[in-house]
Each structure stands twice: as structure tokens, then as C-alpha cells.
Amino acid sequence: MAHEFFMHRCIERAKETQGRVGNGALVWSVLVREGKIIAEAHHRAFGLPHAERSLLDGIEQKISSSDILYVNMEPCCHYGKTPPCTDIIIEKGIKHVVYGMRDPDQRVAGKGIELLKAAGIEAVGPVLLPECERLNRGFVSVRNKGRPWITLKRAQMRDGTTANTGGARLMITSQEQNVWSHTFLRSTHDAILVGVRTVTTDDPVLDARFSSFDYAQDDTQIRYQPSRIVLDPHLRIPMRAKVVSDSHTDRTMIVTSHVANEKCKEALRMRGVRVLEVAMDSDQLDWKDLWRQLITPSNDYHGLTSILVEGGAKTWDIFKKAGMVDEEVILTRCDPS
Ligand SMILES: NC(=O)c1ccc[n+]([C@@H]2O[C@H](COP(=O)([O-])OP(=O)(O)OC[C@H]3O[C@@H](n4cnc5c(N)ncnc54)[C@H](OP(=O)(O)O)[C@@H]3O)[C@@H](O)[C@H]2O)c1
């Protein structure tokens, strides 16, 4: 039970790193002595030391042979942007490690655990495997399928209607449903994606303003905000649309084609919007190129691992027909009106 208790702590706190680690994993680590947490740390941001290294680098107390290090993902054993976590675990004299799941990255994939065992360290796991895999479903999807985890979200009236035929915005969900979806959907994905017609019709902000999650980060309460993606192969987006003209344009990515209007692309870039030029496969964006560009870090872009597809109907259909949906959530209007 103790193992589950401390692993649960790792999972819950690792959620605080959502949106900060680019295409990396959400990881938290705690060090336990005689049943009490004496130190904890996380993978703070893309390119920074992993959770175990942060924890062990910062600890001033001498490690005791009965101390237990908990971490929700297998410690890495390769040189990436930072040195291997297995090195510092061995150097610092940790004798017991409890891990939540194996790291699906082919450079690790069980080798971290084997290395610890070979160094005489007891490595116990997996512990709370389904919960750990759920937490890092985006990271697992990118490593195993080469694309982000996709959740499709649809709001509908009782008769199944999802939009007004005349083009005016149709308000479907209640405030309670909005709080739920901002908290458990928008705040748990790296990005929200819509088709361009949803922008021209609804002019959405695509943020998590109703979320009830506020994370403590360095003594500051922080509300995580996901990135915003608009699929717009012909660059029809109006320059007055909120997602390209408010004060958060650095969170917006417009996905377009190589042949779309160059002046428009430049104008968007001048506003801080990231413009992705993706190859076209007849009239649709080429999935392989799209995923490659979204998951691969480059310069100041760190990649992503999960996307909430909010619509509209044409975009849902394209994702479903292509088999690009991992999970689907339907919110139905509750009152009879
Ligand atoms: N009820 C809900 O949950 C919900 C949610 C969102 C929106 N809506 C409603 O839905 C309506 C808009 O839906 P819609 O079906 O008309 O349009 P949409 O899905 O918002 O946008 C469709 C357009 O996006 C582009 N697009 C999307 N996926 C693409 C892909 N894989 N490759 C290339 N282009 C792609 C295409 O642009 P091009 O036409 O330029 O090729 C396509 O015509 C609005 O009335 C909005 O209020 C409802």
C-alpha cells in the first residue's frame, strides 16, 4: 500500500508539468525516509534535468540505505539533453527505486531498470501502471505511433445537432459542463485544435478559463493554458480572429499549405503566430508531415504529445475517417430546451 500511496503522489504532482515539457514525459519523483517524504522534484521544463536528477542534485542530506526513491517513469539511462538519471541514482547511493511504468523510448525501454539492478539496486515496479500510462498517454503515443494522443470532443443538442445551419453560433453546453471540460479536457491536453470554419463562425478564444485547476509553481498559482491549433490549408482565417489578434498569439499555430498566400503567412508570423506549412494529400493535410512537425522540437518550439480536437463536424469526420482518434467525449445538453 505504501508504494501505491507515494506513486499516487508522483502521478498527481506530475500533472503540474503539463505543457512545460514539450514532447517529453510528465514525471515527478519523491524520496521517502521511514515512511515520510523528505524531498521531491519534477521534470520542470523541456531541456532541464529530469525529476530524479533534480531531486538528487538538490538534496543536502546524506542518503541512507533504507531511503526509497519513487518515480512514475523508469529512470533514463541515455545521454539526451541531460545526462542519464541512472548515473546519479547510483552515484548518490540510492538502494531502492520504485517506478510506475517502463519508459517506451527505445533508448531506454527497460534498460534503465536493468542497469539499476546490475548496480545492486532493488528496482520495484510497475506500480499503478494503468494510472501512470494514462498520465503519459501522449508521450507513449508519440513514442509508439509517431503521433500525439488525440481526444475528440463534441457538444450536441439532444437531437444530435452540433451547429446552426445559418452560421450563427449555437450555445450548447451549460456553465457546469464548461467548467468540467476546461478542467478535465482543455487543461489535460497540450493543444486544442479546430478547423478554420469554426474560427470564422464562432471566433473562439480556445483557452482553459473555466478550469478549476490552479497549480502551485514556485509559490505562484498558475493556470495552465494549452496551445491553439487551427487547420487552415487556404489561409481563410480573418486577421481579426481572436486566436491571431489577442495577447496570446504565441500560443497559436496555424496549419496551412505551402501554396497558401505568403503575405498572410508573414503577417501572422509578425504577430507571433507559428505558421506550419504542411504538405497536402489531394485536398487534405498530409498526416505524416503534420505529426512530424507538431511532435518535433525545433529552435524555440518544444513539440507536443496530446491534442483535443474540438471540431467542427468536417474536422471530426476527417479525423475519424483517418482513424486518428484515441478517445471521444460527447457532451449533450441536459435541459429540455
Ligand atoms: N458542437 C460542437 O461541439 C462544435 C465544436 C466546434 C464547432 N462547432 C460548429 O461547427 C461549425 C463549423 O464546422 P464545419 O464542419 O463547418 O467546419 P470545421 O470543421 O470547423 O472546419 C472545416 C475546415 O477546416 C479545414 N480542415 C479541417 N481539417 C482539415 C484537414 N485534415 N485537412 C485540410 N483541411 C482541413 C478545411 O478548410 P478549407 O475549407 O479551407 O479546406 C475544412 O473545410 C460551426 O458552426 C461551429 O459553431 C460545433
Image (spheres, rainbow, N blue to C red):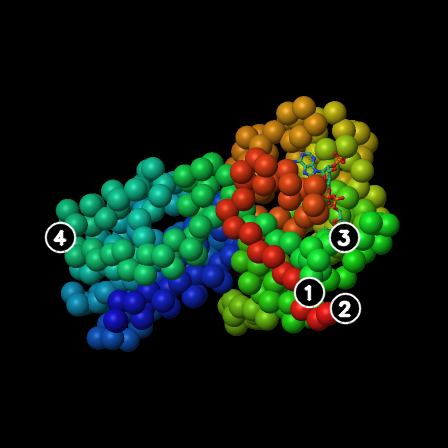
Residue type beneath disc 1: Arg
* Residue 151 screen position, x and y as percent: 55, 50
Q: Amino acid at mark 4?
A: Gly
Q: Secondary structure at mark 4?
A: loop
Location of mark 2 (residue): 337
Question: In the image, is residue 197 above or below residue 156?
Answer: above
Decide: marks 2, 1 in contact (CB < 8 A)? yes
Is tag 1's residue or tag 4's residue first in the polypeptide sequence?
Answer: 4
Location of the C terminus (image quadrant): bottom right
Element type at mark 2: loop
Q: Which of the four quarters of the rendered structure image does ligand 1 lie in?
A: top right
Nearer to us of marks 4 and 3 is 3
Q: CA distance from mark 4 to mark 3?
A: 61 Å
Q: Earlier in the sequence, mark 3 or mark 2?
A: 3
Q: Nearer the viewer, residue 278 or 297?
A: 278
Between label 3 and label 2, give the one nearer the viewer. Answer: 2
In this rendering, is residue 317 above or below 43? above
Residue appearing at x 71%, y 71% in the figure: 335
Q: Name the image quarter holding residue 187.
A: bottom right
Tell me if residue 217 can be seen. yes
Mark linked to residue 163: 3
Q: Is mark 3 within 8 Å of ligand 1?
A: yes
Disc 2 and disc 1: Cα gap in Å? 9 Å
In the rendered image, which residue does mark 1 sit on? 333
Numbered circle sitting on residue 120: 4
Q: Earlier in the sequence, mark 1 or mark 3?
A: 3
Residue shown at 76% from the left, 61% from the top: 171
